[in-house]
Image (cartoon, rainbow, N blue to C red):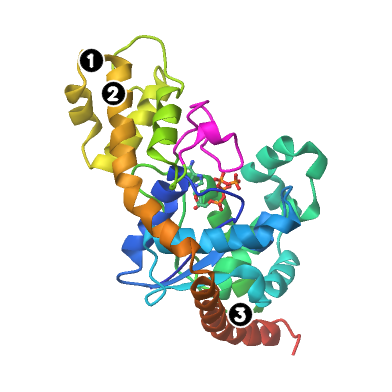
Amino acid sequence: MRIFSGIRPTGNIHIGNYLGAVKQWIELQEKNECVFCIVDLHAITTPYDPKELQKNILDAASIYLAAGVNPEKSIIFVQSEVKEHAELAWLLETITPMGELSRMTQYKEKSKQYKDYVNAGLFAYPVLMAADILLYRAKAVPVGKDQEQHVELARTIAKKFNQKFGQIFPEPETILPKTGAKIMSLTNPKKKMSKTDDPKSYISLFDSPEDITKKIMSAETDSGKEVVYNITKKPGISNLLIIYSLITGKTTQEIEKQFKGKGYGEFKKSLAKVLADYLEPFRRKQKELQTRDVYVKEMLSQGASRAKTIAETTMKEVRSKMGLS
Ligand code: AQP
């Protein structure tokens, strides 16, 4: 099965991105043909510094590698290096109803977050994402919960295209993790953990043990002191319990038992230690890769040429079906 997924090079990849998406990629690449993209054309729809973008792209690539994405098994590349993404997005825009785009939750949230930066690219973002997926005729898209609505739209667009111009695209399915599809912010457990938020609100994959401890110890918890899972009454502690469970493989009930009568402080100390240990190999690999820019660039260029071969074949068919050649 062909699989597509991507991450915006907008900053430090956090444990939400990892547990919601990247962890699944590592498992999926064993048995599938995976295409993993650094979606820089999506990154420029929200405020960014052009001087920082190339560095962020290289950082994202080394993060993929440090997290375990294997370039011998998967295609890893930068979106803007394969021009067909932008071309297909434009063609698909001509069949995407405005009404569908206005319903998108991410557009509503991001246009509130960046009031002075509400641009047409942000509005059309889900069509570019549909193009990313359909260009590779991917059948499945491993993402976190926040991206589920966009994959549904990609399915709608694929169906519409096939009906109007003839069958080309499979209708892609979302692959959501059973738990961890939406890790919440450490400073506001009612909001999703986000890399463009305050660094105190997330644990980056490469945070030092000291930073992890500081962030976890000051993570917002709820009234009372019992470590119990209750998403409505105790959203803060429940979020931390989910993280603990995903990192250790223990169930939330087992963890509740382990910390019965011990209070939030002891639980948080243990979580910080568990996280720091789990992330140690990521930090080590990332340090190694920081000195290997040439290798990372070469890997991306090979990935782009493999991606281009698939993209060109799809676009030939699309242009012909649409009467453009
Ligand atoms: N909090 C989260 N919990 C679980 N999964 C998450 N993802 C994002 N946040 C969480 C998943 O990570 C992948 C990459 O996300 P993205 O870079 O495309 O952008 P995003 O979804 O908008 O993530 P961020 O961290 O909030 O980034 P910014 O701040 O740039 O907008 C996706 O599969 C996403 O579902």
In this rendering, position of residue 317 left or right of residue 32: right
Q: Please rate how many residues cluster around mark 1, counting C-alpha atoms within 10 Å: few if below 14, some from 14 to 19, many from 20.
A: some
Q: Earlier in the sequence, mark 3 or mark 1?
A: 3
Camera-side residue of 236 and 296: 296
Q: Hey, which quadrant is residue 242 in on the image?
A: top left
Q: Position of residue 73 (x, y in %)?
A: 37, 75
**What crowding class fits label 2: few (fewer than 14 Cα within 10 Å), some (14-19), or many (20 or more)?**
many
| Quadrant, the N terminus | bottom left
Query: Which portion, as a residue range, is magenta?
Result: 183-203
Tell me which label, 3 or 2, sits earlier in the chain. 3
Residue at the disc numbered 2: 267
- Can residue 97 be seen here? The reply is no
Write the residue at 40% across / 23% down.
Answer: 217
Amino acid beneath label 2? Phe
Q: Disc 3 versus disc 1: distance between alpha carbons?
A: 63 Å
Q: Which residue lies furthest to the front in this view?
A: 291
Residue 280, x across and y down, in percent = 33, 48
Observer-nearest of 74 and 291: 291
